[in-house]
């Protein structure tokens, strides 16, 4: 993650694009409605996109045709919900593909599905699930960002395994191999992302309290 330009077979690239497109369309409508109903959150929305852009641009070589890096999508999923991140993540990935040669256009659908769809939904579920059992806010934010990051890479390993199954052990064996190569770099990066997201949320609570309260999200009353 990001999977490089041209690395996936054309049918796989087209399939992931078709799967991701409805999420992005729904996300665009959700973002439009959010900006109309709560225009005061535009800066916070832009900051969430910038956070994802900066963190996901910090890449380390990993699986051939791919790389390891933080994703940064957990913050936006925590603040606005996971549906918003499909559009923000797509914009981030598109700019990175065009300006940084990071990822690609043919693999955009696959990268969007792993980083901008699955990762944010996992982060959102973990955040609210841990708050529901009265976990402290910092723990909930940390686990959400970390596990959302790791979920992104698990999906990416699955995408690569489907495209390049092992001749002997098939897709399952290929998934284990891809995931094992990712793990040494991605696990510490996921921990770092979790810590950075906690710091960022604490700063937002200190300096953007009104905007957070207007979102009517769990942050307002969390411990």
Image (cartoon, helix red, strand yellow):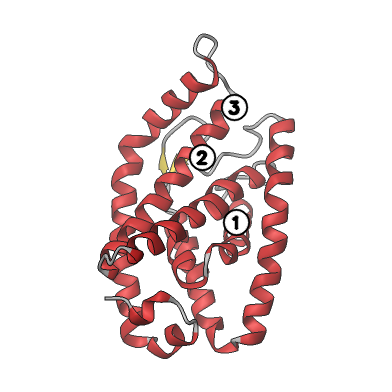
Q: Quadrant of residue 23?
A: bottom right
SS label for mark 2: helix
Image side of residue 91 versus residue 69, left or right: right
Q: Residues within 10 Å of mark 3 (few under 14, many from 20)?
A: some
Furthest-front residue in this view: 133
Number of numbered discs visible in the structure rendering: 3
For residue 162, the mark is 3
Closest to the camera, between mark 3 and mark 1, is 3
Q: Residues within 10 Å of mark 2 (few under 14, many from 20)?
A: many
Image side of residue 82 versus residue 194, left or right: right
Q: Residue at x 69, y 29 (%)?
A: 9
Q: Quadrant of residue 126?
A: bottom left
Query: Which of the two discs, 2 and 3, labels the residue nearer the N terminus?
Result: 2
Residue for badge 1: 99
Place of residue 154 in the rendered image (x, y in percent of width and height, measured from the top left): 46, 38
Residue for badge 2: 155
Query: Marks 3 and 1, how far apart in space?
Result: 28 Å
């Amino acid at each position: 993650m990001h999977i490089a330009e041209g690395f996936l077979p054309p049918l796989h690239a087209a399939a992931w694009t078709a799967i991701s497109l409805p999420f992005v369309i729904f996300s665009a409508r959700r973002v439009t409605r959010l900006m109309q109903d709560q225009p005061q959150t535009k800066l916070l929305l832009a900051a969430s996109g910038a956070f994802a852009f900066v963190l996901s641009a910090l890449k380390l070589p990993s699986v051939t045709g791919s790389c390891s890096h933080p994703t940064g999508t957990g913050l936006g999923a925590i603040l606005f919900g996971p549906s918003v991140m499909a559009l923000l993540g797509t914009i981030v990935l598109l700019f990175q593909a065009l300006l940084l040669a990071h990822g690609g256009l043919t693999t955009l659908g696959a990268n969007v599905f792993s980083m901008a769809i699955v990762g944010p939904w996992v982060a959102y579920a973990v955040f609210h699930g841990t708050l529901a059992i009265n976990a402290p806010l910092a723990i909930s934010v940390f686990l959400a960002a970390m596990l959302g990051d790791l979920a992104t890479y698990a999906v990416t390993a699955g995408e690569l395994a489907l495209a390049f199954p092992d001749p002997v052990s098939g897709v399952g064996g290929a998934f284990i191999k891809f995931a094992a190569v990712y793990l040494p770099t991605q696990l510490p990066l996921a921990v770092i992302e979790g810590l950075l997201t906690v710091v960022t949320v604490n700063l937002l609570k200190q300096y953007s309290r009104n905007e957070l309260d207007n979102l009517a999200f769990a942050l307002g009353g969390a411990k």
